[in-house]
Amino acid sequence: MSGGRPDILFPLFAGLETLTGVGPKTAKAMAGLNVERPRDLLFTLPNSVIDRRRRDTVQGAHIGEVVTVEVTVVRHQKPSRKGLPYRVTVEDDALAFQLVFFRGAPDWIEKQLPLGERRLVSGKVEMYDGQFQMPHPDHILAVEDAGTLPKFEPVYPLAAGVTQKVMVKAVAATRALVPVVNEWIDANLRAREGWPDFSTALEQAHVPLSGHEIAATSPARQRLAYDELFSHQVTLALARAQVRRAKGRQNTSNGALRARVLAALPFTPTGAQERAMVAIADDMASPKRMNRLLMGDVGSGKTLVALDALLVAVEAGGQGVMMAPTEILARQHLEGLRPLAEAAGVVLELLTGRDKGRERKAKLEALARGDIQILVGTHAVFQDDVIYHDLRLAIVDEQHRFGVSQRMALAKKGSGVDVLVMTATPIPRSLSLAQFGDMDVSILDEKPPGRTPVKTALNSTERLADVIAHLKSATDEGRQAYWVCPLVEESEVVDMMAAEERFKVLRAALGEGRVGLVHGQMPPEAKDDTMRRFAAGELLVLVATTVIEVGVNVPNASIMVIERAEHFGLAQLHQLRGRVGRGAVASTCLLLYQAPLTQSGRRRLDIMRDTDDGFRIAEEDLAIRGAGDVLGTAQSGLPRFRVADLERQSALMALAQSDARALLTLDPKLESPRGVAVRVLLWLMGRDEAIRLISVG
């Protein structure tokens, strides 16, 4: 069974052309709906229904309403000249009205609607010259065929070249291929939620008997959404089990170095920091490999938690490494960690692509001897010639910038290396479960004392001259500012031109040598140099596109201007605002918008003004933009669900995760009757990687 897809599912994975009414042309067109195989149609559900229940008469119907009524054909009126419609007068139980055809051959119309015959017609009604009419009825049926018209007709999403009729026919053909399957959902859970079995759920979802049955809250839809989420969580749980099966090392530590660091701190760690440090130390002391995500808002104190973890590795007699996505961030981590590492008497070193020749050789030799206890750097830290004496912990900062393969390469630099992943992008719970469900998660949701609150204000671009005048007086007093340029369109070149224009204007207003510029088209060295000069205080204003890296730390920068802020996502605005308020000076974030604002633009900017809670902002962002946009293309680890809605079904996702983990604890190889049924689900959902993990396991 684990060797290949079960025979009963083969027809669902055949070509679309095997379905009645689907030829090569239609099959190609269905790619526009991401439908490539019959099974994809099972989970492409109708997004609304048309009420086609029969009435006695069109009388009393609202204009534009769909009416289904039995009529007698009274008269045919052919057009007297070109361009006029063909009209057929019909009578229902109460009044006469007209069926109107602007196209269609007269022979065909006469054949469909013979004089004196009874017919069932269904379509939208309109009013013309004080009389009801039905232009181009959707359905014309002989009375004896009336039973073939559903009372509630499903309306499917469409693509160019795919009609409703084609979809209805193709889905019906696919549903006929669904085999009888054993139940994979836990019996108690199904009973508690009142969910139907799989084939009944498919029938209710595709052949709804009321408008309520197509709502996301209907039992059938909930069940199908759960099937998707559960198969995803089983896959993640299998991946997690495999990581944990890989032999870890017990990093037992005495806490001496960590105690020195805590004694040297000018503040007490927050409760959230303490909880995360305990969870990480416990993970590292266990014989299983750690695979943990540390999620914390801007300024929540991840650096201290990271150092505490690195010191556990050192206390256990080994080494730790921390990898950042850019050199600027790596250097910044070094600056934050070095004074604390010195307080603990630990040797900390930096390794980036800039290290060359003799200096690099000396660092690598010291690392291999074990003289360097903690290494901080860019992806240079896992290159082939970098050999660790005894690597125990790898920390990856801003995980979404690195591929899983890079994370794995780092973990392979030692034996049973524990992995801690950090992100400063608060991710809503449902998305973090979808993307990082294979990891244990620690959340830093408290801010350490000493962070200056940032005042956020909104201003129209019409007052640009006033803003520049205020900026001039602030820079004359030695204050530093970021000026983020708008996302003009999805083009780095156009964005760069906008940034260069703004740079020229600000340089003219504020003076030569006080304004720097960074954008995505610059060579990395030039970008790093400008950032370094800004951090050193040589430049007072930094004009930038959104390449200002996550986590760039210039404590003296206390002003953030974001131009055309309405074009940015909430998470992005929040990250940019987090660049200021890092020192003792009161900080301001000015959101410049171009009037008039759209409703969602106004909502986003109001949220930014009203709160600085990154998790609340992330949830709002998810509600406004949806899952795909929130994580963006960089974080493409997010699976695509056809039925499940991550914005509104986060509780289902959490339920699926606990269910999947519980199942695999009891039945790690999916060999019980329920386990075997779950294998069928995994095949059905295309989770081939999960099947591979079972066979490997």
Image: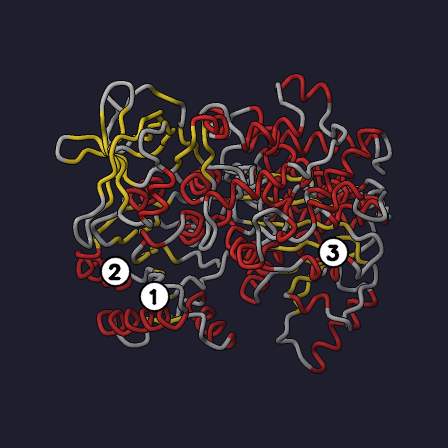
Which label's residue is closer to the chain start, 3 or 1? 3
- According to the image, label 1 marks what residue? 541
Residue 221: x percent and y percent? 56, 30
Residues under numbered marks 3 and 1 in contact, where contact means CB atoms less than 8 Å apart: no
Q: Relative to 614, is 82 on the left or the right?
A: left
Badge 1 marks a residue whose secondary structure is strand
112 and 476: which is toward the camera? 112
Q: Report which residue position mark 3 lands on.
A: 320
| CA neighbours of label 3 inside 10 A, class few (<14), some (14 to 19), many (20+) | many
Spatial CA span between label 1 and label 2:
9 Å
The part of the image, by quadrant, that contains residue 409 is: bottom right
- Asked whether residue 264 is in view, the answer is no
Q: Secondary structure at mark 2?
A: helix
Quadrant location of the N terminus in the rendered image: top right
Query: Which residue position holds label 2?
Result: 471
Nearer to me, 688 or 696 = 688
| Pointer 1 with pointer 2, Cβ within 8 A | yes
N-term mark: 3 or 2:
3
The kind of residue tagged 3 is Gly
